[in-house]
Amino acid sequence: RILFKRLMFVRRLAESVPDQDVLLYVDGNDVLFQHPLSNAVASWRDMVGNSPEGEEPVIFMGLPDCEHRFRRELTKVKYPLRDGQSTTGARACQKWRQEQPDGYLRFLDTGGYLGRAKAVRHALEVAMDLAR
């Protein structure tokens, strides 16, 4: 529920600003930015540099692994898979590691992302559709 409420809140925020505005979202009170936010925006621009303006992708934070999130998974929450089935978080991590063996930050983290308001809205709408 908390994730769904967070998605709804940020989507509403993204609806209230112009499509071309750049949004940076971070979900924690434990976040400390050690450089100006303009550095984060500049890095985003470097990563999406070849994309036409207004068509840039949303860049999400990544983690090197996701096992720590599910190590003591007592509730056995089921997460959706592409084929319409579902699985536990720990099993999803194992499956993703098999499919994506390379790369340092292989696991998407919705706790932070940066992109244009229009693209953020779209990404959040897709996520909310999946969560329903």
Image (spheres, rainbow, N blue to C red):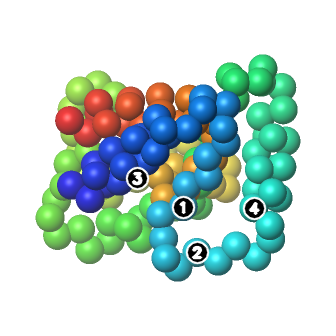
Mark whose residue sits in front, 2 or 3:
2
- CB-based contact (under 8 Å), mark 4 and mark 2: no
Q: Which residue is mark 1?
A: 26
Task: Kindly state the secondary structure of the residue where label 4 is placed.
Answer: helix
> Label 2: how many residues lie within 10 Å, few (<14), some (14-19) or many (20+)?
few
| CA–CA distance in space, label 2 to label 1 | 8 Å
Mark whose residue sits in front, 4 or 2:
4
- Residue at figure coordinates x 40%, y 53% from the top left: 93
Labels 2 and 3: the sequence-earlier one:
2
| CA–CA distance in space, label 3 to label 4 | 31 Å
| x and y, in percent, of residue 102 in the image | 65, 47
| x and y, in percent, of residue 77 in the image | 19, 55
Please say if 35 is above or below 18.
Answer: below
Q: Which residue is mark 2?
A: 31
Check disc 1 and give the amino acid type: Val
- Residue at figure coordinates x 58%, y 75% from the top left: 31
Q: Is residue 49 left or right of residue 125?
A: right
| CA–CA distance in space, label 2 to label 3 | 25 Å
Residue 72: tell me if it is visible: yes
Viewport quadrant of the N terminus: bottom left
Check disc 3 and give the amino acid type: Cys
Q: Which residue is mark 4?
A: 37
Task: Kindly state the secondary structure of the residue where label 3 is placed.
Answer: helix
- CB-based contact (under 8 Å), mark 2 and mark 1: yes
> Label 1: how many residues lie within 10 Å, few (<14), some (14-19) or many (20+)?
few
Q: Give residue 26's quadrant in the image.
A: bottom right
